[in-house]
Amino acid sequence: MTGSQHDRPTTTSAGGRPRLQPRWFIVGFWHAHRALLRATRGRLGLWRPKPDGWGTLWLSTTGRRSGQPRRVVLGYVEDGDNLVTMAMNGWGAAEPAWWLNLQAHPDATVRTRDGVRQVRARRAQGAERERLWARWAEIDKNLDAYAALRPAETAVVVFEPADSASAAGDAQ
């Protein structure tokens, strides 16, 4: 990605709604990105978030039905020690499989440009969700319009370091 993500032109339909690339293109892009990660063992295809943009991570979950490892590439921003993404499925209507997997098995592994870490996933709620949504909206000016294309609220997903997530649960 070149330039600032703020500077991307806004593409809208005649009705003023944002226009997404065709679904086949979105899915194809993410499959190609994941293939690049696999072929290079993660050396290419991951980047750190910039102040005006998001980074990419490689998420490994446990399949909710199969119990098998599953991997997906996601965009993220940092929030202190936490990593934050959105369960948007390319703005498609269905919940992404990785999010359904995390709801069943919240412990996961993420690989970023800075290395591998164990995390525990949870849905942001209330004021935290609003704050994190606003952070994403600073990066993508069409965020609310894209989210309106989905039939349900888009989950904001927080990946907490596994050691701090378990310590917070022990304190309760």
Image: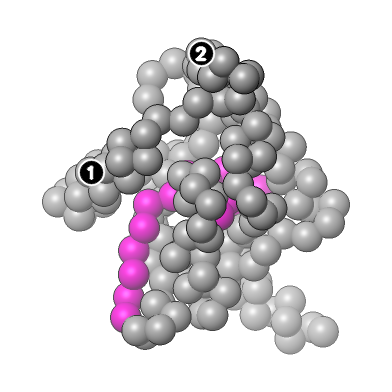
Residue 172 sits above or below residue 45 on the image: below
Q: Main secondary structure of the magenta part?
A: strand
Q: Residue at x 34, y 63 (%)?
A: 71
Q: Quadrant of the C terminus?
A: bottom right
Q: Which residues are magenta?
A: 68-87
Amino acid type of the residue tagged 1 in the rendering:
Ala
Q: Are marks 1 and 2 in contact (CB under 8 Å)?
A: no
Q: Quadrant of the N terminus?
A: top left
State left or right for residue 113 relative to residue 139. left
Amino acid type of the residue tagged 2 in the rendering:
Pro
Asked if the magenta segment contains residue 15, the reply would be no
- Marks 1 and 2 sit apart, C-alpha to C-alpha, by 24 Å
Residue 12 in the image, given as x and y percentages of width and height: 55, 18
State left or right for residue 23 relative to residue 135. left
Which residue is labeled 1 in the image?
32
Residue 76 sits above or below residue 38 on the image: above
Mark 1 residue element: helix
Tell which circle, 1 or 2, labels the residue nearer the N-terminal end: 2
Image-quadrant location for residue 123: bottom right
Which residue is labeled 2 in the image?
9
Give the colour scheme of this rendering: one colour
Mark 1 neighbour density, 10 Å: few (under 14) some (14–19) many (20 or more): few
Q: Residue at x 27, y 42 (%)?
A: 28
Residue 156 in the image, given as x and y percentages of width and height: 65, 54
Asked if the magenta segment contains residue 78, the reply would be yes
Image-quadrant location for residue 46: top left
Residue 100 in the image, given as x and y percentages of width and height: 51, 70
Q: Residue at x 54, y 30 (%)?
A: 53
